[in-house]
Amino acid sequence: MLNITYKTGEIPQIEELIDLFNSSDYFPIKDKTDLGRIATMFKNSNIVITAWENRKLIGLSRALSDFSYCCYLSDLCVRDEYKRQGIGQKLVELTKEKAGNECKLILQSSPNAIAFYSKIGMKQINSAFIIQREY
């Protein structure tokens, strides 16, 4: 049985974030060496929830919210060896809880995570638009 602790509002060290991203099938930006950009992403987020097993970062959720209408879930990441244990689902639930009942939770899924989001009860929509970033 895993002993997992969830923390809200605590931003891990940059080395812990890089290690987590490298230990999953998810890295939010193309240039894995752009530590300044990764640090800025977390500094400017207003919801960060992390999952820990002892002192090891095993998962995280990073989001932007106005706490009254919408919350954009920017990143959801769990180490590969910890997947399929409910950690990702718990991180989504805690993010929604932190954003509040008035907020809808929206995200753009990577292709390999679509089945996960459907499985945890999120509804897929086709009314979203994007101006793609330069990586």
Image (tube, grey):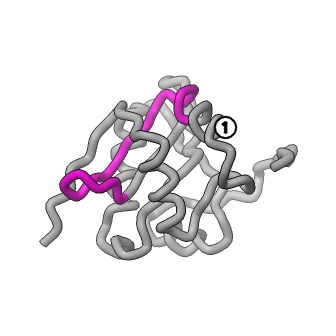
Crowdedness of circle 1 by 10 Å Cα count: few (<14), some, many (20+)? Answer: few
Q: Quadrant of the N terminus?
A: bottom left
Residue at coordinates 49% horizontally, 42% vertically from top-left?
14
Residue 79 as seen in the image, left or right of residue 53: right
Locate residue 46, reporting x and y percent. Answer: 49, 27
Q: Which residue is mark 1?
A: 37
Locate residue 127, reporting x and y percent. Answer: 77, 52
Relative to the observer, which residue lies in front, 32 or 102? Answer: 32
Residue 43 among those drawn in magenta: yes
What amino acid type should be assigned to the residue bearing mark 1? Answer: Arg
Relative to the observer, which residue lies in front, 71 or 13? Answer: 13
Locate residue 53, reporting x and y percent. Answer: 23, 58
Does residue 73 lie above or below 108 as drawn?
above
Residue 131 as seen in the image, left or right of residue 68: right
Label total for image: 1
Residue at coordinates 55% horizontally, 75% vertically from top-left?
115
Relative to the observer, which residue lies in front, 74 or 93? Answer: 74
Secondary structure beneath label 1: helix
Does residue 89 lie above or below 36 as drawn?
below
Q: Which residues are magenta?
A: 42-58
Residue 132 as seen in the image, left or right of residue 3: right
Residue 59 among those drawn in magenta: no
Residue at coordinates 39% horizontally, 56% vertically from top-left?
59
Residue at coordinates 81% horizontally, 49% vertically from top-left?
135
Locate residue 120, reporting x and y percent. Answer: 43, 65
